[in-house]
Image: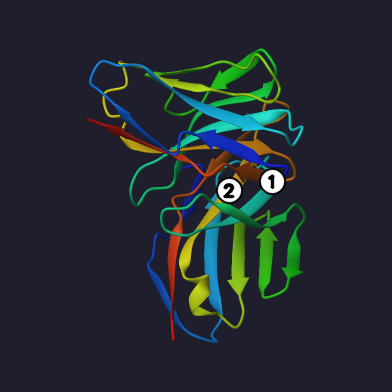
Amino acid sequence: DGGITQSPKYLFRKEGQNVTLSCEQNLNHDAMYWYRQDPGQGLRLIYYSQIVNDFQKGDIAEGYSVSREKKESFPLTVTSAQKNPTAFYLCASMGRGAFFGQGTRLTVV
Amino acid sequence: QKEVEQNSGPLSVPEGAIASLNCTYSDRGSQSFFWYRQYSGKSPELIMFIYSNGDKEDGRFTAQLNKASQYVSLLIRDSQPSDSATYLCAVKIGGSNYKLTFGKGTLLTVNP
């Protein structure tokens, strides 16, 4: 099946720990995006990438890092510098519109 | 001014009525506009996209774009309880290095 796969669905992070969220797509899309959604809020752009080995900061990049070594993959690392990481994280790839994965719910414990 | 603005609602309509959702954007160079539906706890799903001024219809949904007024809307005819969700407006901003920016969404409730 064509689509976008995010894993894990739920993730728990301890204080001071880095965690990496996976995002894989087989839609052959060049552009990929990471968004964060807090309860009752819209989607805020963290990072985006138009092409392999290149990416740009979005509106809330502080405390996050990404890589784009393969067209299919765009992992997001939530670092210990992100002081309030509890949120719903959404990865998307862009064709005629953005298509989303199922999301990862990250909780700090 | 925020790049994409929506009335947060909630918007409540009776079953069978027309629901009207509105969105304004600040970048006059924006070329592509999208409407997404998001059910609680789920990821957004694309409903419609529109590039040209005027109306675009798909089943019960009609997207309307007015670039001069920097305004895009979504009409849902014959609203059903299953249409109850948050509706997100998104705008593609920028040239070759474009980004997709979302509004905060409008919560729609369709009452049986």
Q: Which chain does tag 2 point to?
A: B
Residue type pointed to by label 1: Gly
Left-right relation of B100 to A14:
right
Instruction: List x then y, in percent, for residue B109.
Output: 42, 73
Q: Is residue B1 visible?
A: no
Instruction: List x then y, in percent, for residue B72.
Output: 61, 59
Closer to us: B69 or A40: A40
The quarter of the rendered structure image containing the N terminus of chain A is: top right
Q: Secondary structure at mark 1?
A: loop
Q: Residue at x 77, y 55 (%)?
A: B52
Mark 1 is surrounded, within 10 Å at the Cα level, by few (under 14), some (14 to 19) or many (20 or more) other residues, namely many
Q: Which residue in the structure is indicated by mark 2?
A: B90
Left-right relation of B14 to B54:
left
Q: Is residue A96 visible?
A: yes
The disc label shown at residue A97, or none: 1
Q: Nearer the viewer, mark 2 or mark 1?
A: 1
